[in-house]
């Protein structure tokens, strides 16, 4: 029996998720919600970049999407710059009896002791009212910062530290809001992007650190953050325009969960718009970008994750990881008990139902 699914948000992640929702026989698409006027009335197949017509056309906002009464809503609208609105959208769906899986709002990945208790209760009350479930995930935070570390940690006799890393060249990343506003590429060095303002890194990855800590059974005393910026030596062309000489062209930031003065769990990002910038920083395991999980303990691990895709480059493949994890979790989200669910209490998503030989 197919699962009726609607989608909101057709940006980088949502567009890829929409591709699977159309192509995967497990799902029946009921609606697509968009936020830009130029997409209104466009067939879902065209929005996904597929040569098919689905008969489902894009509508504005949430009301028309929820009116189709799907079993599950895939929510991939921007949450980084509009967390309150994203939470409001998700809460409305949950209260209406519609399960939610998506990439935003990121705070719901593991909200306890990260979000205000009042905000958590509001979401939990909506899940009880609608007998519904919400699971927010992705790649980082997400797959690379919880599922993979936990798989490795489960073989250890002793753990001193878990470190997860994203090492990537973002020159081909075409998300202008993320590149310019959130991360601040092209900004003067003394005017960092929103992500590097005090407390924002801890808010963005606090869920990942708290979930890692909960998974290995420790309680964090505090979360610390730090960053370094590197200017462009000359003008650099990117998918989002020119990064002018002297402005931010590479960054390294680190968020650490501290226990008794030691960094027990760490998230580190090294992001460049040209591969030769700051060669002293960690390099990816494949051209363009990769993820890495390092565990110091007994045994210790250094595991590189190198996603690729026939449909795009390393940046596309990374977003594909997030979209695939979201969409493949739908059956388990629909079957789960009501409430906010995390990687710690969701069943292992194994890829059941996605085997299809190449034509």
Image (spheres, rainbow, N blue to C red):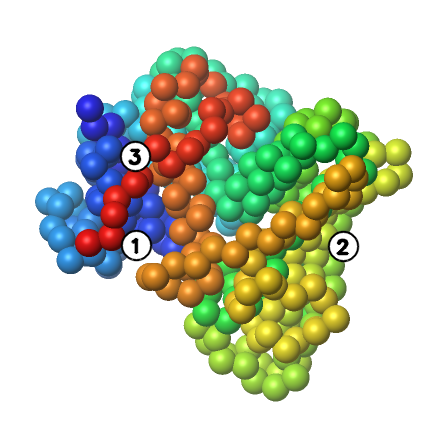
Residue 200 located left or right of residue 177? right
Count all numbered tags in the image, as a single digit. Answer: 3
- Secondary structure, mark 3, is loop
Point out residue 275 in the picture as x, y percentages from the top left corner.
59, 74
Q: Which mark is residue 353?
A: 3
Q: Image quarter for residue 202? A: top right
Q: Image quarter for residue 189? A: bottom right
For discs 1 and 2, the disc positioned in front in the rendered view:
2
Which comes before the other along the chain, label 3 or label 1?
1
Which comes before the other along the chain, label 2 or label 3?
2
Q: Which residue is mark 1?
A: 36
The residue carrying pointer 1 sits among few (fewer than 14), some (14 to 19) or many (20 or more) residues within 10 Å by Cα, namely few
| Separation (CA) of disc 2 from disc 3 | 42 Å
User: The N terminus is located in which quarter?
Assistant: top left
For discs 3 and 1, the disc positioned in front in the rendered view:
3
Q: Which mark is residue 300?
A: none
The residue carrying pointer 3 sits among few (fewer than 14), some (14 to 19) or many (20 or more) residues within 10 Å by Cα, namely few
Q: Are marks 1 and 2 in contact (CB under 8 Å)?
A: no
């Amino acid at each position: 029996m197919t699962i009726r699914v609607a989608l909101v948000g057709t940006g980088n992640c949502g567009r890829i998720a929409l591709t699977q929702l159309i192509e995967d026989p497990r799902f029946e698409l009921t609606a697509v919600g968009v936020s830009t006027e130029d997409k209104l009335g466009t067939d879902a197949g065209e929005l996904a970049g597929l040569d098919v017509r689905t008969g489902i056309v894009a509508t504005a906002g949430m009301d028309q999407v929820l009116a189709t009464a799907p079993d599950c809503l895939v929510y991939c609208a921007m949450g980084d710059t509009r967390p309150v609105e994203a939470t409001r959208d998700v809460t409305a769906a949950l209260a209406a009896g519609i399960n939610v899986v998506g990439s935003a709002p990121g705070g719901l990945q593991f909200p306890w002791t990260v979000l205000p208790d009042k905000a958590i209760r509001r979401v939990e009350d909506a899940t009880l009212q609608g007998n519904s479930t919400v699971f927010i995930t992705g790649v980082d935070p997400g797959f690379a910062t919880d599922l993979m570390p936990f798989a490795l940690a489960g073989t250890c006799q002793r753990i001193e530290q878990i470190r997860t890393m994203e090492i990537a060249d973002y020159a081909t990343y075409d998300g202008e809001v993320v590149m310019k506003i959130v991360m601040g590429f092209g900004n003067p060095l003394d005017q960092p992007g929103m992500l590097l303002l005090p407390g924002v890194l801890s808010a963005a990855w606090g869920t990942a650190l708290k979930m890692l800590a909960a998974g290995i059974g420790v309680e964090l005393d505090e979360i610390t953050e730090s960053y370094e910026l590197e200017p462009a030596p000359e003008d650099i062309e990117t998918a989002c325009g020119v990064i002018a000489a002297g402005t931010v062209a590479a960054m390294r930031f680190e968020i650490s969960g501290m226990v008794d003065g030691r960094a027990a769990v760490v998230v580190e990002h090294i992001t460049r718009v040209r591969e030769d910038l700051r060669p002293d920083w960690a390099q990816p395991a494949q051209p363009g970008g990769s993820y890495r999980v390092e565990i110091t303990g007994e045994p210790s691990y250094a595991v590189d994750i190198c996603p690729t895709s026939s449909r795009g480059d390393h940046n596309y493949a990374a977003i594909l990881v997030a979209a695939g994890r979201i969409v493949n979790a739908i059956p388990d989200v629909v079957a789960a008990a009501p409430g906010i669910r995390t990687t710690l209490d969701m069943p292992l998503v194994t890829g059941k139902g996605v085997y299809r030989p190449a034509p």
